[in-house]
Image (tube, helix red, strand yellow):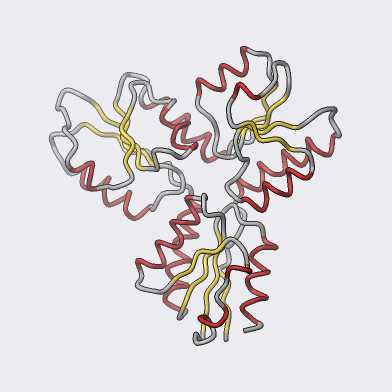
Protein backbone atom coordinates (compact mmCIF):
# COMPACT_ATOMS: atom_id res chain seq x y z
CA UNK A 1 0.00 0.00 0.00
CA UNK A 2 1.15 3.52 -0.87
CA UNK A 3 0.12 6.27 1.55
CA UNK A 4 -0.18 9.89 0.39
CA UNK A 5 -0.39 12.75 2.91
CA UNK A 6 -1.89 16.13 2.05
CA UNK A 7 0.57 19.01 2.53
CA UNK A 8 -1.77 21.09 4.69
CA UNK A 9 -3.04 18.29 6.94
CA UNK A 10 -3.22 19.39 10.58
CA UNK A 11 -3.19 22.63 12.55
CA UNK A 12 -4.06 25.85 10.78
CA UNK A 13 -2.65 29.24 11.76
CA UNK A 14 -5.64 30.17 13.94
CA UNK A 15 -5.56 26.96 15.95
CA UNK A 16 -1.79 27.18 16.38
CA UNK A 17 -2.07 30.75 17.69
CA UNK A 18 -4.86 29.83 20.12
CA UNK A 19 -2.92 26.92 21.60
CA UNK A 20 0.24 29.02 21.82
CA UNK A 21 -1.62 31.61 23.91
CA UNK A 22 -2.96 28.88 26.18
CA UNK A 23 0.49 27.30 26.50
CA UNK A 24 1.98 30.68 27.46
CA UNK A 25 -0.55 31.10 30.28
CA UNK A 26 0.13 27.59 31.59
CA UNK A 27 3.88 28.28 31.45
CA UNK A 28 3.39 31.37 33.63
CA UNK A 29 2.40 29.06 36.46
CA UNK A 30 -0.52 31.22 37.60
CA UNK A 31 -2.20 30.37 40.89
CA UNK A 32 -5.52 28.61 40.50
CA UNK A 33 -7.17 26.98 37.49
CA UNK A 34 -6.93 28.24 33.92
CA UNK A 35 -10.40 28.74 32.43
CA UNK A 36 -11.35 28.47 28.77
CA UNK A 37 -14.83 29.52 27.70
CA UNK A 38 -15.87 26.49 25.69
CA UNK A 39 -13.47 23.98 24.09
CA UNK A 40 -10.46 25.90 22.78
CA UNK A 41 -10.61 23.79 19.60
CA UNK A 42 -12.78 20.90 18.44
CA UNK A 43 -10.48 17.98 19.12
CA UNK A 44 -11.09 15.69 22.13
CA UNK A 45 -7.52 14.39 22.30
CA UNK A 46 -6.11 17.93 22.56
CA UNK A 47 -8.70 18.86 25.19
CA UNK A 48 -7.79 15.81 27.26
CA UNK A 49 -4.12 16.81 27.22
CA UNK A 50 -4.95 20.30 28.49
CA UNK A 51 -7.29 18.95 31.14
CA UNK A 52 -4.32 17.05 32.61
CA UNK A 53 -2.49 20.38 32.82
CA UNK A 54 -5.27 21.90 34.92
CA UNK A 55 -7.20 23.70 32.18
CA UNK A 56 -10.93 23.89 32.97
CA UNK A 57 -13.61 24.32 30.32
CA UNK A 58 -16.41 26.66 31.36
CA UNK A 59 -19.44 25.71 29.28
CA UNK A 60 -21.28 28.87 30.36
CA UNK A 61 -19.97 32.38 31.19
CA UNK A 62 -21.50 32.06 34.66
CA UNK A 63 -19.04 29.26 35.43
CA UNK A 64 -16.10 31.69 35.19
CA UNK A 65 -15.52 33.30 38.65
CA UNK A 66 -15.69 37.08 38.91
CA UNK A 67 -12.30 38.78 38.65
CA UNK A 68 -10.55 35.73 37.19
CA UNK A 69 -8.89 35.28 33.79
CA UNK A 70 -10.46 33.39 30.90
CA UNK A 71 -9.17 32.34 27.49
CA UNK A 72 -11.55 32.82 24.56
CA UNK A 73 -11.46 29.83 22.24
CA UNK A 74 -10.44 29.93 18.57
CA UNK A 75 -14.09 29.97 17.41
CA UNK A 76 -14.75 33.22 19.27
CA UNK A 77 -17.76 34.17 21.41
CA UNK A 78 -20.79 36.41 21.02
CA UNK A 79 -20.46 40.15 21.47
CA UNK A 80 -22.95 40.03 24.35
CA UNK A 81 -21.01 37.37 26.25
CA UNK A 82 -17.77 39.32 25.86
CA UNK A 83 -19.41 42.47 27.21
CA UNK A 84 -20.82 40.51 30.16
CA UNK A 85 -17.38 39.13 31.06
CA UNK A 86 -15.85 42.60 31.04
CA UNK A 87 -18.62 43.95 33.28
CA UNK A 88 -17.73 41.27 35.87
CA UNK A 89 -14.08 42.32 35.92
CA UNK A 90 -12.88 39.17 34.19
CA UNK A 91 -9.58 39.45 32.33
CA UNK A 92 -10.03 38.22 28.77
CA UNK A 93 -7.24 36.50 26.87
CA UNK A 94 -8.63 36.55 23.34
CA UNK A 95 -7.49 33.50 21.38
CA UNK A 96 -10.13 33.96 18.67
CA UNK A 97 -8.76 33.01 15.25
CA UNK A 98 -7.74 36.22 13.42
CA UNK A 99 -9.83 35.13 10.40
CA UNK A 100 -12.91 34.73 12.62
CA UNK A 101 -12.24 38.08 14.28
CA UNK A 102 -11.99 39.70 10.85
CA UNK A 103 -15.31 38.13 9.82
CA UNK A 104 -16.96 39.45 13.00
CA UNK A 105 -15.77 43.00 12.27
CA UNK A 106 -16.79 42.82 8.60
CA UNK A 107 -20.29 41.70 9.49
CA UNK A 108 -20.57 44.39 12.16
CA UNK A 109 -19.44 47.13 9.77
CA UNK A 110 -21.61 46.09 6.83
CA UNK A 111 -24.79 45.61 8.88
CA UNK A 112 -24.43 48.78 10.95
CA UNK A 113 -27.19 50.49 8.96
CA UNK A 114 -29.75 47.72 9.56
CA UNK A 115 -28.82 45.53 6.58
CA UNK A 116 -30.11 41.96 7.02
CA UNK A 117 -27.48 39.22 7.32
CA UNK A 118 -27.64 35.96 5.39
CA UNK A 119 -25.03 33.61 6.88
CA UNK A 120 -24.03 30.31 5.29
CA UNK A 121 -23.07 28.08 8.22
CA UNK A 122 -24.12 25.67 10.95
CA UNK A 123 -26.73 27.22 13.23
CA UNK A 124 -25.49 25.46 16.39
CA UNK A 125 -21.78 26.16 15.82
CA UNK A 126 -20.11 28.54 18.33
CA UNK A 127 -18.38 30.50 15.58
CA UNK A 128 -21.70 31.09 13.83
CA UNK A 129 -23.38 32.28 17.01
CA UNK A 130 -20.54 34.74 17.47
CA UNK A 131 -20.75 36.02 13.89
CA UNK A 132 -24.51 36.56 14.05
CA UNK A 133 -24.14 38.52 17.29
CA UNK A 134 -22.32 41.24 15.34
CA UNK A 135 -25.19 41.69 12.87
CA UNK A 136 -26.95 45.00 13.39
CA UNK A 137 -30.40 43.71 12.44
CA UNK A 138 -30.37 39.98 13.12
CA UNK A 139 -30.01 37.44 10.36
CA UNK A 140 -30.80 34.12 8.77
CA UNK A 141 -28.43 31.17 9.25
CA UNK A 142 -28.67 28.40 6.66
CA UNK A 143 -26.61 25.28 5.91
CA UNK A 144 -28.44 24.44 2.66
CA UNK A 145 -27.87 27.00 -0.12
CA UNK A 146 -31.17 26.07 -1.78
CA UNK A 147 -33.02 27.58 1.18
CA UNK A 148 -31.87 31.06 0.18
CA UNK A 149 -33.41 30.72 -3.27
CA UNK A 150 -36.77 30.40 -1.52
CA UNK A 151 -36.17 33.33 0.85
CA UNK A 152 -38.79 36.15 0.62
CA UNK A 153 -36.47 39.03 -0.31
CA UNK A 154 -37.89 42.52 -0.05
CA UNK A 155 -36.96 45.23 -2.60
CA UNK A 156 -37.07 47.76 0.25
CA UNK A 157 -34.32 46.06 2.25
CA UNK A 158 -30.57 45.69 1.89
CA UNK A 159 -28.85 42.37 2.50
CA UNK A 160 -25.38 41.11 3.39
CA UNK A 161 -24.22 37.61 2.45
CA UNK A 162 -21.40 36.03 4.48
CA UNK A 163 -20.21 32.58 5.50
CA UNK A 164 -18.76 30.65 8.41
CA UNK A 165 -14.99 30.73 7.83
CA UNK A 166 -14.75 26.97 7.24
CA UNK A 167 -17.57 26.61 4.72
CA UNK A 168 -17.29 25.29 1.15
CA UNK A 169 -16.02 28.16 -1.00
CA UNK A 170 -17.39 26.78 -4.31
CA UNK A 171 -20.92 26.40 -3.02
CA UNK A 172 -20.81 29.85 -1.42
CA UNK A 173 -19.41 31.40 -4.60
CA UNK A 174 -22.13 29.86 -6.76
CA UNK A 175 -24.80 31.18 -4.38
CA UNK A 176 -23.27 34.67 -4.38
CA UNK A 177 -23.26 34.75 -8.19
CA UNK A 178 -26.94 33.77 -8.36
CA UNK A 179 -27.99 36.42 -5.86
CA UNK A 180 -25.87 39.19 -7.37
CA UNK A 181 -27.36 38.44 -10.80
CA UNK A 182 -30.86 39.23 -9.53
CA UNK A 183 -31.94 42.81 -10.22
CA UNK A 184 -34.57 42.74 -7.45
CA UNK A 185 -32.03 42.30 -4.61
CA UNK A 186 -29.65 44.84 -3.09
CA UNK A 187 -26.97 42.54 -1.66
CA UNK A 188 -23.35 42.88 -0.53
CA UNK A 189 -21.18 39.76 -0.50
CA UNK A 190 -18.45 39.48 2.13
CA UNK A 191 -15.36 37.31 1.66
CA UNK A 192 -15.22 35.57 5.05
CA UNK A 193 -14.13 32.04 4.10
CA UNK A 194 -10.59 31.31 5.27
CA UNK A 195 -7.96 30.67 2.59
CA UNK A 196 -6.64 27.75 4.66
CA UNK A 197 -10.07 26.12 4.36
CA UNK A 198 -10.12 26.64 0.61
CA UNK A 199 -6.61 25.17 0.24
CA UNK A 200 -7.43 22.12 2.38
CA UNK A 201 -10.58 21.42 0.40
CA UNK A 202 -8.76 21.79 -2.91
CA UNK A 203 -6.04 19.39 -1.73
CA UNK A 204 -8.73 16.94 -0.55
CA UNK A 205 -10.21 16.91 -4.07
CA UNK A 206 -6.77 16.33 -5.60
CA UNK A 207 -6.09 13.59 -3.07
CA UNK A 208 -9.38 11.92 -3.99
CA UNK A 209 -8.36 11.87 -7.67
CA UNK A 210 -4.97 10.34 -6.85
CA UNK A 211 -6.11 7.73 -4.30
CA UNK A 212 -8.29 4.64 -4.12
CA UNK A 213 -9.48 5.54 -0.63
CA UNK A 214 -9.11 8.60 1.63
CA UNK A 215 -8.83 8.80 5.42
CA UNK A 216 -9.72 12.12 7.08
CA UNK A 217 -8.35 12.56 10.61
CA UNK A 218 -9.94 14.89 13.15
CA UNK A 219 -12.55 15.44 15.83
CA UNK A 220 -16.09 14.38 15.03
CA UNK A 221 -17.33 17.73 16.34
CA UNK A 222 -15.03 19.65 13.99
CA UNK A 223 -17.06 21.22 11.19
CA UNK A 224 -14.09 21.79 8.87
CA UNK A 225 -13.01 18.15 9.27
CA UNK A 226 -16.49 16.85 8.45
CA UNK A 227 -16.54 19.05 5.35
CA UNK A 228 -13.21 17.65 4.18
CA UNK A 229 -14.72 14.17 4.31
CA UNK A 230 -17.78 15.41 2.41
CA UNK A 231 -15.59 17.05 -0.26
CA UNK A 232 -13.90 13.69 -0.86
CA UNK A 233 -17.22 11.83 -1.01
CA UNK A 234 -18.54 14.42 -3.46
CA UNK A 235 -15.72 13.32 -5.78
CA UNK A 236 -17.20 9.82 -5.70
CA UNK A 237 -14.30 8.43 -3.66
CA UNK A 238 -14.77 6.17 -0.60
CA UNK A 239 -13.76 8.01 2.55
CA UNK A 240 -13.48 7.36 6.29
CA UNK A 241 -13.44 10.01 9.02
CA UNK A 242 -11.56 8.87 12.14
CA UNK A 243 -10.31 10.58 15.30
CA UNK A 244 -7.47 8.14 16.01
CA UNK A 245 -5.51 5.36 14.32
CA UNK A 246 -7.25 2.76 16.50
CA UNK A 247 -10.44 3.31 14.50
CA UNK A 248 -8.91 2.20 11.19
CA UNK A 249 -10.50 -1.01 9.77
CA UNK A 250 -7.21 -2.58 8.73
CA UNK A 251 -8.71 -5.66 7.04
CA UNK A 252 -11.00 -3.52 4.89
CA UNK A 253 -8.22 -1.15 3.87
CA UNK A 254 -5.79 -3.89 2.88
CA UNK A 255 -7.34 -4.18 -0.60
CA UNK A 256 -6.53 -0.59 -1.59
CA UNK A 257 -3.30 0.22 -3.42
CA UNK A 258 -3.19 3.97 -2.72
CA UNK A 259 -4.69 5.55 0.42
CA UNK A 260 -4.75 9.30 0.84
CA UNK A 261 -4.67 11.00 4.25
CA UNK A 262 -5.70 14.51 5.18
CA UNK A 263 -6.74 16.14 8.46
CA UNK A 264 -8.82 18.96 9.83
CA UNK A 265 -7.41 22.28 10.98
CA UNK A 266 -7.71 21.29 14.65
CA UNK A 267 -5.95 17.91 14.34
CA UNK A 268 -2.50 17.64 16.02
CA UNK A 269 0.35 16.33 13.90
CA UNK A 270 1.09 13.33 16.12
CA UNK A 271 -2.43 11.91 15.57
CA UNK A 272 -1.98 12.26 11.82
CA UNK A 273 1.38 10.48 11.93
CA UNK A 274 -0.07 7.65 14.00
CA UNK A 275 -2.62 7.08 11.24
CA UNK A 276 0.17 7.16 8.63
CA UNK A 277 2.23 4.63 10.60
CA UNK A 278 -0.72 2.28 11.03
CA UNK A 279 -1.57 2.44 7.30
CA UNK A 280 2.03 1.81 6.26
CA UNK A 281 2.11 -1.36 8.35
CA UNK A 282 -0.89 -2.82 6.53
Residue 56, above or below 272: above
Q: Nearer the viewer, residue 257 or 243?
A: 243
Task: Say above or below: 187 vs 235.
Answer: above
Relative to 98, does residue 88 appear above or below in the rendering?
A: above
Q: Is residue 92 above or below residue 27?
A: above
Question: At 73% across and 21% down in the image, what residue appears?
Answer: 68
What residue is drawn where x is 33% and y is 19%? 113
The x, y position of residue 147, in whole percent, is 23, 43
In front of the other: 242 or 130: 242
Please identify the quarter of the rendering in which residue 182 is found.
top left
Residue occupying the point 85% across, 34% down = 28
Q: How many marks?
A: 0
Q: Quadrant of the C terminus?
A: bottom right
Nearer-the-camera pick, 131 or 240: 240
Given residues 169 and 27, the one toward you in this image is: 27
| Residue 136 position in % (x across, y down) | 37, 21
Which residue is found at the position 16% from the left and 33% from the top?
152
Q: Position of residue 38 (x, y in %)?
A: 60, 35
Judge left or right: residue 105 versus residue 218.
Answer: left
Residue 35 position within the rendered picture, expressed as x and y whole percent measured from the top left = 70, 31
Amino acid sequence: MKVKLAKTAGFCMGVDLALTKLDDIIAEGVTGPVFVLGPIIHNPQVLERYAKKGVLIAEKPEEVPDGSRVVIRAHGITRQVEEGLKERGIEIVDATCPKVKKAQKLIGRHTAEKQFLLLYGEDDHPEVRGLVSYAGNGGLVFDDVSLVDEFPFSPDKKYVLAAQTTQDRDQFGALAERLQAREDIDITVLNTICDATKLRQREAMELADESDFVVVVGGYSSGNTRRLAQVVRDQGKPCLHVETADELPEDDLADYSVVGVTAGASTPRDLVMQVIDRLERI
